[in-house]
Image (cartoon, coloured by chain):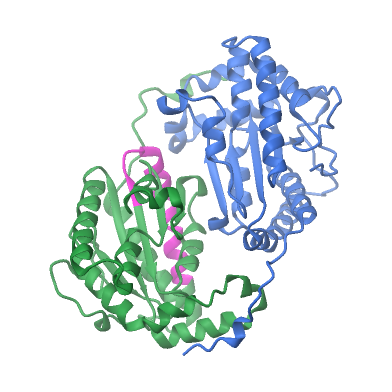
Chain colours: A green, B blue
Amino acid sequence: MLIDSPFLAKPGKKHKLSAFKTRENGNFKDKQTGQRAAEANVAKMAPLQEKLYAEAKRSLLIVLQAMDTGGKDGTIEFVFSSVDPQGCQVTSFKAPTSTELAHDYLWRVHQNCPARGMFGIFNRSHYEDVLVPHVKGWITPEQTKKRYEHINAFERMLVDEGTTVLKFLLNISKDEQKERLIARQQDKDKHWKFNPSDLDARKDWDKYMEAYEELINACSTDYAPWYVIPSDRKWYRNICVSEIIVKALEEMNPKYPKVEIDPRKFVVE
Amino acid sequence: MLIDSPFLAKPGKKHKLSAFKTRENGNFKDKQTGQRAAEANVAKMAPLQEKLYAEAKRSLLIVLQAMDTGGKDGTIEFVFSSVDPQGCQVTSFKAPTSTELAHDYLWRVHQNCPARGMFGIFNRSHYEDVLVPHVKGWITPEQTKKRYEHINAFERMLVDEGTTVLKFLLNISKDEQKERLIARQQDKDKHWKFNPSDLDARKDWDKYMEAYEELINACSTDYAPWYVIPSDRKWYRNICVSEIIVKALEEMNPKYPKVEIDPRKFVVE
């Protein structure tokens, strides 16, 4: 499903990632106004989600990718602030376990795809498997290309079988990441989260940007497009992401199932 | 872990379920005051959960059982309103799939137990397997007793290996259920949820109460006790449940892990 959005990476075109902005404020005069707009957006999700759940025929998969500190966790908390937690499942893909490594890279992803009626949110995803190994040279460019094809075929199947797939790159600038990393270093309660290797990906920033550009050009499809969200401002990121989700749900137009019986005719004794 | 609470079904005693109240308001002068107290309670969870997650050594399992309309969904939404959704996993146990039925009844339960650092909430649980089959006579009283032993042994293992287990029976009166069922019948948007068989368990109300009484007497243990929560008033139920969860977390006293390195010494370039 293609949602009309200025942040859509139009399928079939060669995009420059640098052409997508990281710092935007739309037409909002200040942060407070923007936050209220984001909250109003996300509030529209709850009734649509309830219908999707009741209908139990289709599902919504939200894929979040970003550089470290890019805002994946914050986006998830924001989306969750409206929806019924029982209809929404988050999967955080971390370093694979030995059992996961013993299978193909899509195996654990497939296992965690949302069931009919459900929202699924992926905090990182199968796209990590065309990022790190690609940047590090652990797989050849040919293998990476093959993986793009696997991924497109896999998402095609998901979509054909009833899943709407929305993929978001939370796009932050290198300067913004620097600020956020330094802020995190200063917060003693966040020290347990710190891993010196977090800084490695930053050293490879340009290579990651190239890898993102390549995967977006290869895998932004009509059926499962990528949206590149300006994410230096958290509130604006929240507005953009929630707007696309709401539009997708409205287009899906889920309906309460027809009830053959009239519950009011049953006597509660 | 035993939390001091008027709603604890003290292990080793024979309890009458009818001795536990369903309608309580504590010392709260009205509903608004009660709701504020519930919100203040649940707000205490977030920092404790973050530490539990950071520590990543132990987990918390919250088991919710209730008659239909008893408030399991509402309790989950309430608990979730405070915690980080990525650190909290809800499992709703519905009618088992054919794969699940091909295994023992604890198989799917075990698969969904929370990992170290996580909150796990069970919406229904393995206790369904000593309720419905017991009430319906699908298993013999001897089989049911064996299952109590399996369950106690299983929970013993979970506790020994680092899971704190809190089990809540959301205790509503038959009259309150009637009101809630009728309200649900009147709400057209909830008709898809209605199943005439929902009324069957109500017809067997007394048998279910006996089955609950028996399982509480058999499975309220020092390491994984049952709490029987007065649940006719939703806000009071929320106060009681959150109070016990907060006390348990305080007793667990999770700590941020010691960080060997000083993140501030690393330069963000």
Q: Residue at x 29, y 55 (%)?
A: A165
Q: Which residue is drawn at 35% across and 38% down?
A: A55
Residue A218 quadrant: bottom left
Q: In this view, does A16 lie above or below B215?
A: below
The reply to whether residue B172 is in sight is: no
Q: Does the magenta stretch include residue A53?
A: yes
Residue B119 in picture, x, y percent from top left: 62, 50
Q: In the drawing, does residue A57 fall left or right of residue B232?
A: left
Residue B153 quadrant: top right
Q: Does the magenta stretch include residue A82?
A: no
Q: Quadrant of the C terminus of chain A?
A: top right
Q: Mainly helix, strand or loop, the magenta region? A: helix
Nearest the camera: A130 or B211?
A130
The reply to whether residue B215 is in sight is: yes
Q: In the drawing, does residue A180 fall left or right of residue B139?
A: left
Nearest the camera: A33 or A184?
A184
Q: In the drawing, does residue B251 fall left or right of residue A243?
A: right
Q: Quadrant of the N terminus of chain A?
A: bottom left
Residue A24 in picture, x, y percent from top left: 36, 82
Nearest the camera: A168 or A65?
A65
Residue A90 in picture, x, y percent from top left: 46, 54
Q: Residue at x 69, y 57 (%)?
A: B45
Q: Is residue A80 above or below residue A37?
A: above
Q: What stretch is highlighted in magenta?
A: A36-60
